[in-house]
């Protein structure tokens, strides 16, 4: 069955790149509504709304940026999209009062906790459809590549390789069924090199970034207070990003995703390659057994206390 949030959940912080205060509210939505963002600062008309879909993504080096082609854009949607996918929310109206989603702690943890505290409403009588990948699809650019292959549930396999020894080479593979995102990935923060932070700020970017909402490294050193939440937090965050970017398919994916040095743009290119080949995918109505293998399965039963235990405060 489809699901929505039971009561509104509100989040406030600054935008990562603008440094401007941002307020976001997730509101319940009817079956088959999908995930839709509403830029409330642009009014109440249809031009102020952006569907959370792969074909609304516009090129951006540092985040996932949506553009409805009618003057409304919204950046840094990947962390909230990952939280919605990981908790099994299929329908929601998300109101944002500016051009950027609040960064919070740089992970999806606070979004997940807010959703679980607000509650998840199963929309009985509204069957859920998923997208089944039928054959491998791959995109490459230099040493980076990403691939989707057939599977009966979502798996994510990621490899990264950074010169900074605080990160280095990291590999991780996870079956995303039955709450794995909440348990394994949701609290992993975005990361960057100190030299990159300095360069971005010289160009008027990352104005809202700090050691409190990102893991900042410099060679062998982790500069953020408290160090890492996981020894492999960097690759876990890349998997979190992939989860959010894959959620822009518009429905749960039944596929194995493999990323090697892949980023937001490459994952979007992969979705575009998939949907450009009608014989590479199909719609399928989820049976109860299939629903039990989706990322949000069972998460609705989590209490706020369980959420606090599962995620770093």
Image (tube, rainbow, N blue to C red):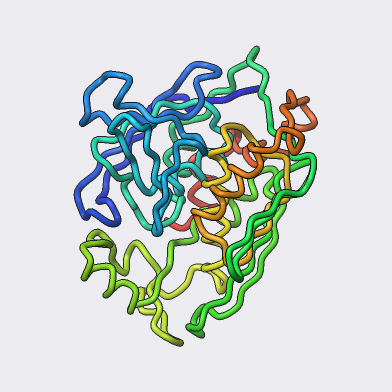
Q: Nearer the viewer, residue 239 or 189?
A: 239
Q: Is residue 173 left or right of residue 150?
A: left
Q: Position of residue 55 (x, y in %)?
A: 50, 36
The image quadrant of residue 261 is: bottom right
Q: Residue at x 49, y 61 (%)?
A: 188
Q: Is residue 296 left or right of residue 248?
A: right
Q: Residue at x 55, y 29 (%)?
A: 90
Q: Nearer the viewer, residue 162 or 69?
A: 69
Quarter of the figure with the C terminus: bottom left
Residue lying farthest to the top in this orientation: 125
Image height of 9 relative to 151, above or below: above
Total numbered labels = 0
Image height of 296 relative to 27, above or below: below
The image quadrant of residue 31 is: top right
The image quadrant of residue 294 is: top right
Image height of 263 relative to 108, above or below: below
Q: Residue at x 72, y 40 (%)?
A: 254
Quarter of the figure with the N terminus: top right
Q: Position of residue 304 (x, y in %)?
A: 48, 41
Q: Nearer the viewer, residue 6 or 103?
A: 103
């Amino acid at each position: 069955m489809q699901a929505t949030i039971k009561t509104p959940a509100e989040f406030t912080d600054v935008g990562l790149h603008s440094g401007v205060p941002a307020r976001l509210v997730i509101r319940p939505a009817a079956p088959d509504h999908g995930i839709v963002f509403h830029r409330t600062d642009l009014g109440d008309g249809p031009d102020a709304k952006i569907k959370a879909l792969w074909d609304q993504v516009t090129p951006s080096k540092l985040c996932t940026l949506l553009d409805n082609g009618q003057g409304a854009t919204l950046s840094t949607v990947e962390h909230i999209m990952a939280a919605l996918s990981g908790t099994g929310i299929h329908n929601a109206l998300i109101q944002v009062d500016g051009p950027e989603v609040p960064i919070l702690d740089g992970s999806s943890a606070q979004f997940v906790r807010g959703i679980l505290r607000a509650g998840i409403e199963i929309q009985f009588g509204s069957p859920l459809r998923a997208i089944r990948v039928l054959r491998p699809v791959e995109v490459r650019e230099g040493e980076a590549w990403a691939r989707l292959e057939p599977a009966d549930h979502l798996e994510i396999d990621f490899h990264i390789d950074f010169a900074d020894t605080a990160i280095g080479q990291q590999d991780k593979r996870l079956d995303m069924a039955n709450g794995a995102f909440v348990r394994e990935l949701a609290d992993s923060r975005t990361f960057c090199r100190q030299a990159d932070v300095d360069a971005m700020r010289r160009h008027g970017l990352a104005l809202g970034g700090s050691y409190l909402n990102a893991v900042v490294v410099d060679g062998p050193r982790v500069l953020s207070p408290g160090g890492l939440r996981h020894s492999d937090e960097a690759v876990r965050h890349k998997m979190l990003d992939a989860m959010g970017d894959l959620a822009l398919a518009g429905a749960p994916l039944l596929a194995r995703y493999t990323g090697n040095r892949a980023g937001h743009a490459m994952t979007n290119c992969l979705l575009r390659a998939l949907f450009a080949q009608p014989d590479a995918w199909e719609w399928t109505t989820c049976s109860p057994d299939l629903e039990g293998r989706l990322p949000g399965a069972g998460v609705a039963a989590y209490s706020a206390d369980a959420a606090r235990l599962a995620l770093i405060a």
